[in-house]
Structures are given as C-alpha cells and as structure tokens.
C-alpha cells in the first residue's frame, strides 16, 4: 500500500517570528576554548620540558664533571702505569743483557770444559798409543814378551783410570793381545844371552881331552902307615900301569896339536856369538843348530871328566831346548782399535757453534 507523505511547509513559514537577540562572545566559542586549552597544555608541557631539560643539564654537567675527574684519575694512573712499564722494560732489558752475558759465559765454560776434556782424552790416548808402540817394538825388534806384556798392561791400566765408555773397544783389544802374549812360552832373552856370555868367558879355562893327566896316586907317609902298607901301595901302582880299562861306547877324543887348541876355542866362541845373534833375531833354527854343534865340540874335544866341562855341556843342551823363534803376535787388534778411536776423536774435535745469545744480544722488546 502506498501513501504519499504530505510535504511540510518550510520551517520559516511554520515557525513563528522570534524577536532578534544579541550574538554570543568569541571567547565562549568551543573552538576558542579548545584552542586555549591546547595552548595552556602546550605551555605547561613546555615549562615541564624545560624543567626536565634543566635537570638533565645539571645531571649531565655533574656526570661530565665526574667523568672529567675519572678521566684525570685514569690519565694519572695511565701515566703511572707507563712509568712503571718503562721501569719494567728497563729492568727487563737489564735482565736480558745479564741473561745474554750469562748464557755467553755458560757457552764459553762448556767450550772450555769440552776442550779440556778433549785435551785430557787426547793426552790419555797419546800415552796409550805410545805404550802400544813400545810393546810392538819390543816384540818385533827385541822379541821381549815380558816387556811387551808390561807395556800393554800399563796401557790398559791408564784407560781404566779414566773410565770412558767409548774406550771399551780398545780395552777389549788390549785384553785379547794380553791373553795372546800370556799364552806364549816365556823366553828370557837377556838371561840366555848372559849365559852365553858367561860360557864364552869360561872356555879358556876348560881343559881339552888330549891334555888330561892321570890322577896322582897318594903316597903313604911312614908315620901313618907301616912298611907293609907302603909295599902294597907300590905293588898296586905298578899293577895298574899294566892294566888299562877304556869305554868302547864312545869314540876316542880327537887329538889336536897345541897350536890348534887356540883356534878351537876361538871357533867355539864364534859359534856361541852366532847363537847369541840368532837369539836376538829370533832365528830358532840357527840358534838350536849352534847350540848342538857347540855341545858336540865340547863332548869331542874337551875333557868331560872335568866338572866345569860337564856343566858347560849341560848348559848348552838346556839352552838348545829354549823356545827361540816363536811367532809373536803383531798387536794389530790394539793398534787398529786405537787408530779408530783417535780418528773418531779427531772428527768430534770441531769448534763448538756459539748460540745466538752468545753471538749478539737479544732484540729489545716492543713497548
């Protein structure tokens, strides 16, 4: 259902006429009031802000003052620390210098000790080398085993007095050579030569076989025995001249003219001198042959019934059994070990390199 709303007449026409009134004040307008309130709020905000800014400035100034005080104190402490650091650096530099000096002295002392030790070891090795050389000379030139053995024992005792582990090889070689010399038959060359010299001096007094005289028969004295004993002795003497008893198991002594006796004795002396020369040269075959010929000449041309001749013959036979001409060891083990040790010592005897602290002072530390 539709209905139409009747149009209303205009308001002016509907309202009745009102009498005219006065216009309201400008300050009473809402916009003005709002603006005034806004300005008041802004002013209060500005005043409050300035108060806070003033407080902040005072607090900032106070803090800046405190910061300046702290900065000044920190600067003072920094300066003190720098001074202390400088003192410490100076002290450290002095300690570095002393350390470098001490290290250089230590290196010098080590070098001196090593030099002294090498000098002592070299001296000991030189003494041992000389002793081994003397032992080799005694064996090769004189054939004196006793002196060579004494020299090797002296060398071993000298090494034992220092007691170096690197010398054990030399001591082992010396021990082997000493055992080898002890196993050899001992020949007293000097004693044998002295005996030969004594025999040569006694040859002139030894009687020859053709110069032997019958023993003189004792003559009884009349005061001691009666005429019957004298008669028996005279009978016995005459009977002994009729009967002659000789040994047939050996040839008759060779007869020599009296002028040839001198040559016999001189030839026998030459034979003994040749035997002594063979003894010195360790020619065993020649020595034994000379002893055999000398003993045979004594048995053939000299009177063995004489005690001096028999003693000389026995001595020659005993000397013939002397072990002359034994092969003597050349002591190569000791000499080779000693040469190797000396070569090793020479390779080690090099100048000791100085440490960097001994060559130059250590660089200064950075600040």
Image: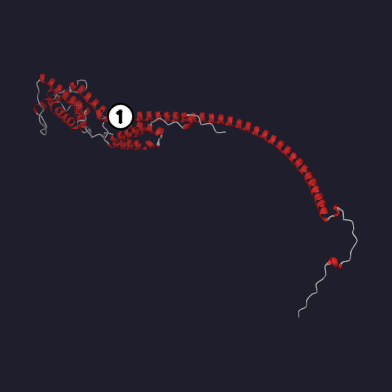
SS category of the residue bearing label 1 = helix
- Residue 166: percent from the left, percent from the top? 38, 37
Q: Is residue 52 left or right of residue 216?
A: right
Q: Residue at x 10, y 20 (%)?
A: 260
Q: Residue at x 37, y 37 (%)?
A: 168
Q: Is residue 353 left or right of residue 336?
A: right
Q: Residue at x 84, y 67 (%)?
A: 11
Say if 27 sits above or below 17 in the image.
above
Q: Please, which residue is most extreme toward the bottom here?
A: 1
Quadrant, the C terminus: top right
Quadrant, the N terminus: bottom right
Q: Is residue 137 left or right of residue 83?
A: left
Q: Which residue is mark 1?
A: 133
Viewer-closest of 250 and 264 = 264
Viewer-closest of 37 and 224 = 37
Viewer-closest of 305 and 25 = 25
């Amino acid at each position: 259902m539709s209905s139409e709303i009747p149009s209303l007449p205009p308001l002016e026409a509907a309202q009745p006429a009102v009498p005219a009134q006065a216009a309201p004040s400008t300050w009473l307008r809402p916009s003005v009031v709002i603006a005034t309130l806004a300005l008041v709020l802004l002013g209060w905000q500005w005043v409050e802000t300035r108060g806070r800014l003033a407080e902040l400035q005072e607090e900032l100034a106070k803090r800046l003052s405190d910061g300046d005080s702290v900065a000044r104190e920190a600067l003072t402490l920094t300066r003190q620390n720098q001074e202390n650091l400088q003192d410490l650096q100076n002290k450290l530099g002095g300690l570095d210098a002393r350390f470098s000096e001490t290290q250089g002295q230590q290196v010098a002392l080590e070098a001196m000790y090593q030099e002294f030790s090498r000098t002592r070891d070299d001296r000991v090795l030189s003494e041992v080398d000389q002793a081994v050389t003397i032992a080799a000379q005694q064996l090769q030139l004189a054939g004196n085993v006793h002196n060579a053995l004494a020299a090797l024992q002296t060398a071993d005792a000298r090494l034992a007095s220092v007691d170096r582990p690197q010398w054990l090889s030399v001591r082992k070689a010396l021990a082997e050579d000493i055992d080898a010399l002890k196993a050899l038959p001992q020949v007293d060359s000097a004693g044998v030569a002295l005996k030969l010299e004594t025999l040569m001096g006694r040859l002139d007094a030894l009687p020859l076989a053709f110069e032997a005289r019958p023993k003189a028969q004792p003559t009884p004295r009349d005061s001691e025995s009666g005429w019957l004993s004298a008669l028996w002795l005279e009978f016995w003497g005459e009977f002994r001249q009729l009967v002659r008893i000789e040994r047939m198991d050996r040839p008759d002594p060779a007869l020599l003219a009296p002028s040839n006796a001198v040559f016999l004795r001189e030839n026998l002396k030459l034979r003994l001198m040749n035997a002594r020369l063979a003894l010195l040269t360790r020619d065993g075959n020649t020595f034994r042959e000379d002893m055999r010929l000398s003993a045979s000449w004594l048995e053939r041309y000299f009177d063995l019934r004489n005690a001096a001749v028999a003693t000389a013959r026995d001595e020659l036979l005993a000397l013939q059994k002397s072990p002359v001409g034994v092969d003597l060891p050349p002591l190569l083990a000791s000499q080779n070990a000693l040469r190797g040790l000396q070569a090793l010592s020479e390779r080690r005897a090099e100048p000791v390199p100085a440490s960097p602290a001994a060559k130059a002072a250590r660089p200064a530390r950075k600040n």
